[in-house]
Image (spheres, rainbow, N blue to C red):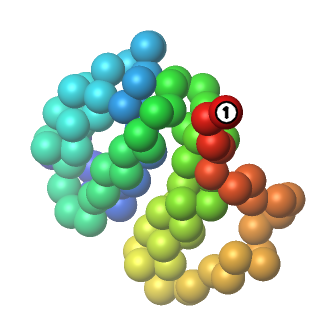
Amino acid sequence: MPEVRAPLLILHGDQDEVVPLEQAQRLLAAANEPKHLYVIHGARHNDTYIVGGRDYFDAWLGSCNRWSGKPLSKNKLNGDIPERHKEP
């Protein structure tokens, strides 16, 4: 990681059963700026965008806008952005 000079966004579920959150935190600590870890509470390994819903996509889009210098608008995203998953 010390040689990587690209922006880093980690989107990670706090209930990930494949890659523990601690590994994402270690990766973030080793990375150069700019970097950001966005933790999706209640998300597992393969449902971060479903559980995170609009907040997940806002975090992604916000990072792209900060780092690219070419802001994207929400209407440029393809497909529908799901609302945050709610437990029954």
Q: Is residue 52 left or right of residue 33?
A: right
Total labels: the figure holds: 1
The residue sitting at the front extreme is: 88
Q: 4 or 35, which lies in front?
A: 35
Q: Nearer the viewer, residue 15 or 66?
A: 15
| Residue 74 x/y as whole percent | 70, 76
Q: Say if 22 sits above or below 17 in the image.
A: below
Q: Which quarter of the image is occupied by the C terminus?
A: top right
- Could you tell me which quadrant the N terminus lies in? top left
Rendered residue at 61%/35% (across/down): 87
**For the view shown, which residue lies furthest in the right direction?**
79
The answer to whether 25 is drawn above or below residue 59 in the figure is above
SS for callout 1: loop
Question: Is residue 68 shown to the viewer in this render?
Answer: no
Q: Which residue is mark 1?
A: 88
Which three-letter amino acid code belongs to the residue tagged 1? Answer: Pro
Q: Locate residue 46: give its quadrant.
A: top right
Residue at screen point 37% across, 51% down: 38
Residue at horizontal 46 percent and vertical 33 percent from the top: 42
Q: Residue at x 37, y 31 (%)?
A: 14
Location of residue 22 by image quarter: top left
Residue 15, quarter of the rendered image: top left
The location of residue 56, given as percent across then percent down, is 54, 55
CA neighbours of label 1 inside 10 A, class few (<14), some (14 to 19), many (20+): few
Q: Residue furthest top?
A: 18
**Taking the image as drawn, is residue 34 in sight?**
yes
When the figure is inspected, residue 13 is found, relative to residue 66, above or below; the finding is above
